Image (cartoon, helix red, strand yellow):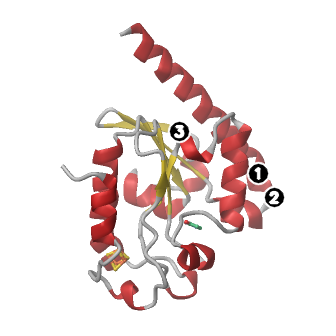
Amino acid sequence: MYTLEELKSFVVNCRKCPLCRGRTNVVFGQGNPKGDILFVGEGPGYYEDQQGLAFVGPAGQLLTKAIEGIGYTRDEVYIANIIKCRPPNNRNPLKDEVNACIPYLRWQVKIIQPKIIICLGAVAATNIIDPDFKITQERGKWYEKKGIWIMATYHPSAVLRDALKKRPFWEDFKELKKKHEEIKDEIHEN
Ligand code: URA
Ligand code: SF4
């Protein structure tokens, strides 16, 4: 079994798909390697590509606010993306690119062993929960897969573009807090 650092040292040199050509940095993801909660976005944007870190631009600032709003810090969770290299002009990743890259996320999940995964936006939700996932209708619902609780909410960038998404986004974060508290109770009972 690799550690996250070993996996990262391998992924930063990846050339498995054409996105390697346009990247400044591979964005492996960062945070608590033993975090209970894993957030999964879509892929790096401009700022993430420049810095090699996930969610550090405007969307990242909103994510930070939401995480802190329910009483956590970014350091206690883990934050990653479906794809690790920035697509040109932030277009959605192509199927082949996702297929090439998603094994790295699966490895991250195996190593981190999160109790909860939060999909940020439709790209994460369709690739993690269900290919037919409808973010507007199905956000905020819990799914259990292999002992991990999974929920999707809106992508923070979508919330920044549409003020009507703010309230449901915030509701979903409160749901996340509630679920995490419940799970912690279960751990104490055992
Ligand atoms: N959007 C994403 O999906 N991921 C990031 O890391 C930043 C913006
Ligand atoms: Fe490799 Fe993923 Fe980057 Fe493609 S997007 S080059 S598969 S790390």
Q: Residues within 10 Å of mark 2 (few under 14, many from 20)?
A: few
Name the residue located 46 percent from the left edge and 70 percent from the top edge: 27
Name the residue located 76 percent from the left edge and 67 percent from the top edge: 161
Say if 44 sits above or below 175 in the image: below
Q: Residue furthest top?
A: 189
Name the residue located 56 percent from the left edge and 59 percent from the top edge: 121
The secondary structure type at the circle numbered 1 is: helix
Q: Position of residue 73 (x, y in %)?
A: 63, 42
For marks 3 and 2 on the same chain, the one whose residue lies earlier in the sequence:
3
The Cα–Cα distance between marks 1 and 3, rounded to whole angstroms, is 17 Å
Q: Nearer the viewer, mark 1 or mark 3?
A: 1
Q: Residues within 10 Å of mark 1 (few under 14, many from 20)?
A: some
Q: Residue furthest right?
A: 163
Q: Position of residue 29 (x, y in %)?
A: 46, 60
Asked if labels 3 and 1 touch by Cβ distance under 8 angstroms, the answer is: no
Which label is found at residue 163? Answer: 2
Asked if labels 2 and 1 touch by Cβ distance under 8 angstroms, the answer is: yes
Give the total number of marks visible in the rendering.
3
The Cα–Cα distance between marks 1 and 2, rounded to whole angstroms, is 5 Å
Q: Position of residue 175 (x, y in %)?
A: 62, 33
Tell whether 166 sits left or right of 146: right
**Which amino acid type is marked by label 3?**
Lys
Q: Position of residue 153 (x, y in %)?
A: 59, 50
**Which amino acid type is marked by label 2?**
Ala
Tell whether 140 sits left or right of 70: left
Corner quadrant of residue 190: top left
For marks 1 and 3 on the same chain, the one whose residue lies earlier in the sequence:
3
Q: Which residue is mark 1?
A: 166
Q: Which residue is mark 3?
A: 141
Tell whether 135 sits left or right of 72: left
